[in-house]
C-alpha cells in the first residue's frame, strides 16, 4: 500500500487477472458514525471477512499511511541483514512468535514449503508493557516509528470495533476492551518479504492458506499475490478467528494465502506489513452475550481454553499443516435476534 512513492515504481498488476471486488469502506465515514458505511462494513465482515479501508480523507488515516511507509522502509532494512544474521533472533513457536521466521518453516496447501520471510515485533515490547527485548538492529533504531504505527493502527482498529459493537447490539466498547493497548497480549507488527520468483512459477504458493487467529488484522501491501484482494491507498482489514468465536460465528474469518505476484509484478521482491491484533492474555474465548449474538444452542459448548492456550493450539495446527484451511463464520442472523 502506503503512498504513491511505493506504488509508482511497481510493475503494473496485469489487466487479465481477475480480482475479488471487496467493499471499500471510508475510514472518515466510520469515524463520523455514518450509518450506511457502518452497515456496509458489518456486511463485509459477515460475507467476506475482509474489506478495504480507505484512509485518505481522514487526518488520522493519512497519518497512518505515512507511518506504514516507514514500516516498509523498516522491512527493507531488516531483511537486508540476511537470514544468517536474522537467525540470531529466530522465533520460537508456538509460545513466542516474536522474531525471525526464515522461509520454508511452514507447510503450504500443496505440501511444499513456504517462500515467505517474516519478522514479528511484539507490541508489549514496543509500548512498554514488558521490559525491552533485544531485536534486530533496524527494529531497535526505529522503536519510535514502530510505536507510532502501533498507536495509530490501534486507534483505527478501535473505531472499527466500536462500529461492530453497534451492529452486534452489544455495549459500546465491548470488542475494544478485549484487546486494549496497555495489557499484555500476543499482538504484533509483522513485516514480510518474499523474493522475486521466476515466471514459470506463476502459481507457486508463497504463504499457505490460513485464517488469522487474533481479533482483527490491518494489512498493508503493494504488490498483488494475496488471493483475496487488490491493493490501493487503502489498508486491508480482516476479521480473525477470535472474533468469530466471540460472535458465535456471525462474523467471518476468511481463508487467504499469498502466491507469486502476478505477471511482471512477480519479478520484484514483495513486502507487506501487518498489524495483527490479539486479545489480552487473560480474556475469555467464550461467546459474548447480548444483541444479535446467538446464545449457545443445544449441544454447543463454550470454548473454555484461555486466549493463550487457544492461540498456541491454533498456531501449532497451522505450522504443522494439520489444520485444513477453512473459512469460518458468516452464519445467518437468527430472525429472533435481529435488532429493530
Ligand atoms: O503478505 C500478505 O499480503 C498477507 C500476509 C498474511 O496473510 C499474514 O501475515 O497473516
Ligand atoms: Fe493472514
Image: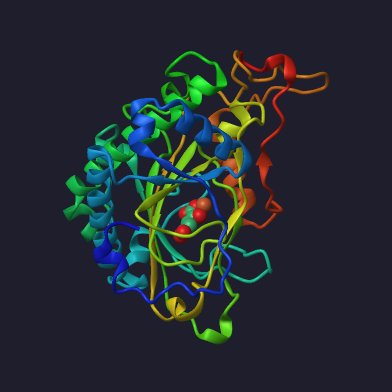
Residue drawn at 56 percent across, 71 percent down: 17
Residue at 42% over, 51% down: 219
**How many dots with numbers?**
0
In this picture, is 148 found above or below 206? above
268 shown above or below 173? below
Up-down: is 173 above or below 184?
A: above
Residue 195 drawn at (x, y percent) = 42, 75
Residue 285 quadrant: top right
Could you tell me which residue is drawn at 28 percent across and 52 percent down? 68
Horizontally, residue 255 falls left or right of residue 149, namely: right
Q: Quadrant of residue 322?
A: bottom right
The answer to whether residue 280 of the structure is visible from this angle is no
Residue 336 visible (yes or no): yes
Left or right: residue 7 compared with residue 316: left
Front-most of 15 and 234? 15
- Image quarter hosting the N terminus: bottom left
Quarter of the image that includes the C terminus? top right
Q: Please state which of residues 25 and 146 is positioned toward the viewer in this rendering.
A: 25
Q: Residue at x 22, y 44 (%)?
A: 63
Q: Position of residue 275 (x, y in %)?
A: 39, 46
Residue 263: % across, % down: 50, 79
Amino acid at each position: 500500500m502506503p503512498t504513491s512513492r511505493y506504488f509508482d515504481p511497481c510493475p503494473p498488476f496485469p489487466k487479465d487477472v481477475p480480482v475479488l471486488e471487496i467493499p471499500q469502506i471510508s475510514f472518515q465515514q466510520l469515524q463520523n458514525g455514518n450509518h450506511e458505511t457502518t452497515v456496509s462494513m458489518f456486511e463485509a465482515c459477515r460475507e467476506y471477512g475482509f474489506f478495504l479501508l480507505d484512509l485518505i480523507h481522514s487526518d488520522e488515516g493519512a497519518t497512518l499511511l505515512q507511518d506504514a511507509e516507514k514500516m516498509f522502509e523498516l522491512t527493507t532494512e531488516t531483511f537486508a541483514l540476511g537470514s544468517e544474521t536474522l537467525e540470531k533472533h529466530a522465533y520460537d513457536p508456538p509460545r513466542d512468535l516474536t522474531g525471525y521466521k526464515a522461509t520454508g518453516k511452514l507447510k503450504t496447501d500443496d505440501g511444499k514449503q513456504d517462500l515467505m520471510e517474516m519478522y514479528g515485533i511484539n507490541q508489549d515490547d514496543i509500548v512498554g508493557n514488558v521490559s525491552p527485548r533485544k531485536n534486530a538492529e533496524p527494529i531497535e533504531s526505529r522503536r519510535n516509528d514502530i510505536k507510532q504505527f502501533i498507536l495509530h493502527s490501534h486507534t483505527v482498529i478501535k473505531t472499527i470495533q466500536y462500529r461492530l459493537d453497534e451492529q452486534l447490539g452489544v455495549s459500546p466498547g465491548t470488542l475494544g476492551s478485549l484487546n486494549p493497548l496497555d495489557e499484555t497480549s500476543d499482538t504484533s507488527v509483522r513485516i514480510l518479504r518474499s523474493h522475486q520468483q521466476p515466471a514459470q512459477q506463476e502459481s507457486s504458493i508463497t504463504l499457505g492458506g490460513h485464517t488469522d487467529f487474533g481479533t482483527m488484522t490491518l494489512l498493508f501491501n503493494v504488490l498483488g499475490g494475496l488471493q483475496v484482494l487488490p491493493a490501493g491507498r487503502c489498508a486491508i482489514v480482516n476479521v480473525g478467528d477470535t472474533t468469530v468465536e466471540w460472535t458465535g460465528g456471525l462474523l467471518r474469518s476468511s481463508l487467504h494465502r499469498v502466491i507469486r505476484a502476478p505477471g511482471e509484478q512477480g519479478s520484484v521482491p514483495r513486502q507487506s506489513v501487518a498489524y495483527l491484533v490479539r486479545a489480552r492474555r487473560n480474556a475469555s474465548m467464550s461467546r459474548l452475550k447480548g444483541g444479535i449474538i446467538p446464545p449457545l444452542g443445544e449441544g454447543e459448548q463454550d470454548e473454555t481454553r484461555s486466549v493463550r492456550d487457544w492461540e498456541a493450539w491454533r498456531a501449532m495446527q497451522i505450522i504443522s499443516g494439520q489444520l485444513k484451511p477453512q473459512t469460518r463464520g458468516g452464519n445467518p442472523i437468527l430472525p429472533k435476534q435481529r435488532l429493530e
